[in-house]
Image: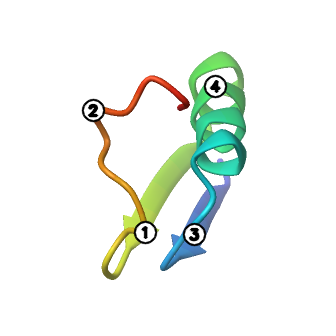
Amino acid sequence: MFDVVLHQPEIPPNAGNAIRLAANTGIRLHLVGPLGFSLAERQL
């Protein structure tokens, strides 16, 4: 199994794509540091 780390992501669509990829492939995703957006944003 792989782990993917996004360190201080700032672009919501890119983070959203990584979240969907992780959900569909079973990869563990870690969002680290202050995020440049809210996780409640629709753009994710």
Locate residue 6: give its quadrant. bottom right
User: 33 or 36: nearer the eye?
Assistant: 36
SS type, badge 3: strand
SS type, badge 4: helix
Q: Which residue is under mark 1?
A: 36
Q: Which residue is under mark 2?
A: 40
> How far apart are the alpha carbons under marks 4 and 1?
18 Å
Q: Which residue is under mark 3?
A: 6
Q: Earlier in the sequence, mark 4 or mark 1?
A: 4
Residues under numbered marks 2 and 3 in contact, where contact means CB atoms less than 8 Å apart: no
Looking at the rendered structure, the number of numbered marks drawn on it comes to 4
Q: Which residue is under mark 4?
A: 20
Residue type pointed to by label 1: Gly
Q: Is 21 left or right of 15, judged from the image as shown? A: right
Circle 3 packing at 10 Å, graded few (<14), some (14-19), many (20+), is: some
Residues under numbered marks 3 and 4 in contact, where contact means CB atoms less than 8 Å apart: no
Q: Position of residue 40 (x, y in %)?
A: 27, 32
Q: Against 27, is 30 above or below?
A: below
Circle 1 packing at 10 Å, graded few (<14), some (14-19), many (20+), is: few
Q: Earlier in the sequence, mark 1 or mark 3?
A: 3
Q: Against 17, is 33 above or below?
A: below
Residue type pointed to by label 2: Ala
Residues under numbered marks 2 and 1 in contact, where contact means CB atoms less than 8 Å apart: no
Residue at the image point whose x is 65% and y is 47% from the top: 1
